[in-house]
Image (tube, rainbow, N blue to C red):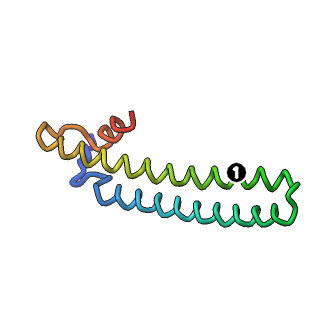
Amino acid sequence: MPSKYILKNPPIDRNRIQKVCKKVMDEANDDRKLALDTHRFFRQMLDDNPQDATAKNLMVDCLKLAQTSKVSILKVVDLLIKLDTAQFKGTDKAESDSLYSQLDNLTD
């Protein structure tokens, strides 16, 4: 019968979560910059032809995308704060909850 494999360290630790969050935040910043650049492009098209309805719609879509990327960053920061708070509170009680269950509880 095979022996049960027991991890010495958690598969996802605090540093790994912070790396992933930083990557998400960096990508969201890049998306925001690209959306604002594209918005400026369509704005220039509207300056040349104010009747271009397609450029107006695409300009609005770019602003929505820029706002969505900002909201994504705020959600990541909020989850990190909640995780820190949960870990701080977790030092007082039994630490039987895995990191996965803690994150699952935070997203509820």
Q: Position of residue 27 (x, y in %)?
A: 52, 62
| 27 relative to 100, above or below | below
Name the amino acid type tagged 1: Asp
Q: Position of residue 56 (x, y in %)?
A: 78, 53
Residue at 71% from the left image edge and 51% from the top image edge: 60
* SS label for mark 1: helix
In the picture as drawn, the residue positioned furthest to the left comes out as 92
| 20 relative to 5, above or below | below
Q: Nearer the viewer, residue 45 or 82?
A: 45
Q: Is residue 48 left or right of residue 41?
A: right
Residue at 64% from the left image edge and 60% from the top image edge: 35
Q: Position of residue 94 (x, y in %)?
A: 13, 37
Residue at 75% from the left image edge and 62% from the top image edge: 43
Q: Quadrant of residue 31?
A: bottom right
Q: Nearer the viewer, residue 40 or 75?
A: 40
| 86 relative to 40, above or below | above
Residue at 76% from the left image edge and 62% from the top image edge: 42
Q: Position of residue 57 (x, y in %)?
A: 77, 50
The number of numbered badges drawn on the structure is 1
Identify residue for label 1: 61
| 75 relative to 49, above or below | above
Q: Nearer the viewer, residue 80 or 8?
A: 80
Q: Quadrant of residue 34?
A: bottom right
**Quarter of the picture holding the N terminus:** top left
